[in-house]
Amino acid sequence: MKAVQIVRPNDLRIIDTEIPVLSERDNILVRMTAAGICGSDVGIYHGTNAAATYPRIIGHEMVGQVVETGSGATRLKEGDRVIINQVTSCGHCYPCRKGRGNVCDNLKVRGVHIDGGYRQYIAVPESDCYLLPDSISDTDAVMIEPTTIAIQASSRAQLERDDMLLLFGCGALGSSILKIARLHCDHIIVSDINDEKLAIARENGATHTINVLQEDLQTKVLEYTAGHGATVSIDAVCNTTSLPTLLQATGNAGRVITMGFSISPSQVTQFSVTSKELDIRGSRLQNKMFGEAIRLIEEGKLDLTGSCSHTFQLTQAQQAFDFIDSHDPSIRKIVLTFDF
């Protein structure tokens, strides 16, 4: 079978490898039909993702069809359309015992620490597969995984209806968070540097928007929060200045959610945290949130239709990554397909 492997940073290859054989643990064989390209995949390709190991078959937004079931499989059958959980955990360490397997002491993420979904077939445990609703296409379904990341961030933020949320950044991550946050919170401020993205954010539920290239963020946040500052800030920019910026923009007793993986230092003072008694909380991956995302789709509360802007065949992965590096403004979500 064909697979996309990052041998080392900036060295992407289409390789031939064996089709997986089912085992007692990996008892579902899935033929891949669609796999999304995420910013973290681009980071692995360019060598800026500190968590990745090489060589690696990447890809963690994984949609496919069951072609074989093995020992112990009781829920799925051949032909079922599924999305695959990218998180694997041990189940017995301290985080796992506390119900937080997404930060398991022995965490392995498909496509990052172990081989992922940019291949024609993958074998996984039945418990890691979630049935897809008939109402969503395979290409749109890849956005369920980013949605689970957004659900996790909103959960970590403990969003409530009367919160005044500052969502910092409205790219792919920020847009996913906005779709979930608006289900829990009525007052949402979105900041970005792109007027077109901000216009879309207003259409999708943002109460106020701020173009930080044209307006002062702190001044506008205070204006939009009656002088208090945001009660919750979520960082969807994740650069070295975003955390200090959000500490300043968040009001007393607020919560700041960080999601970035940069190892470059940010300049943060103790005073900016202690004086307001802020909670700074990391949000990593997702903690079994696929079921929640699918429930929202089935109930008509979440619409992912048209999420994919471009498709490339798996064997055109190099062209796809080169296109992403062009920063073409038409790019929303690029999906690799397996119809070759």
Image (cartoon, rainbow, N blue to C red):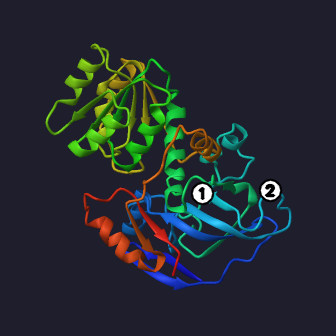
Could you tell me which residue is drawn at 25 percent across and 62 percent down? 328
Picture quadrant of residue 243: top left
Q: Is residue 12 above or below residue 280?
A: below
Could you tell me which residue is drawn at 48 percent across and 49 percent down? 304
Describe residue 248's horizontal placement relative to residue 316 as left or right: left
Describe residue 200's horizontal placement relative to residue 125 as left or right: left
Could you tell me which residue is drawn at 41 percent across and 78 percent down? 316
Furthest-bottom residue in view? 16
Furthest-front residue in view? 135
Could you tell me which residue is drawn at 48 percent across and 20 percent down? 161
Picture quadrant of residue 299: top right
Return the x and y of residue 44 as percentages of the image width and height. 43, 65
Return the x and y of residue 141 as percentages of the image width and height. 54, 56
The residue pinned by badge 2 equals 75
Count the numbered circles shown. Answer: 2
Cα distance, mark 2 to mark 1?
19 Å
Q: Please state which of residues 255 and 309 is positioned toward the viewer in this rendering.
A: 309
Q: Does dot 2 land on a helix, a strand or a loop? A: loop
Q: Is residue 172 above or below residue 156?
A: below
The residue pinned by badge 1 equals 86
- Is residue 155 something one can see in this rendering? yes
Mark 1: give few (<14), some (14-19) or many (20+) Cα within 10 Å.
Answer: many
Residue 121 tag number: none
Q: Does dot 1 land on a helix, a strand or a loop? A: loop
Three-letter amino acid code at the position of disc 2: Arg
Q: Is residue 134 above or below residue 233?
A: below
Tell which circle, 2 or 1, labels the residue nearer the N-terminal end.
2
Return the x and y of residue 190 as percentages of the image width and height. 31, 34
Three-letter amino acid code at the position of disc 1: Gln
Q: Are marks 2 and 1 in contact (CB under 8 Å)?
A: no
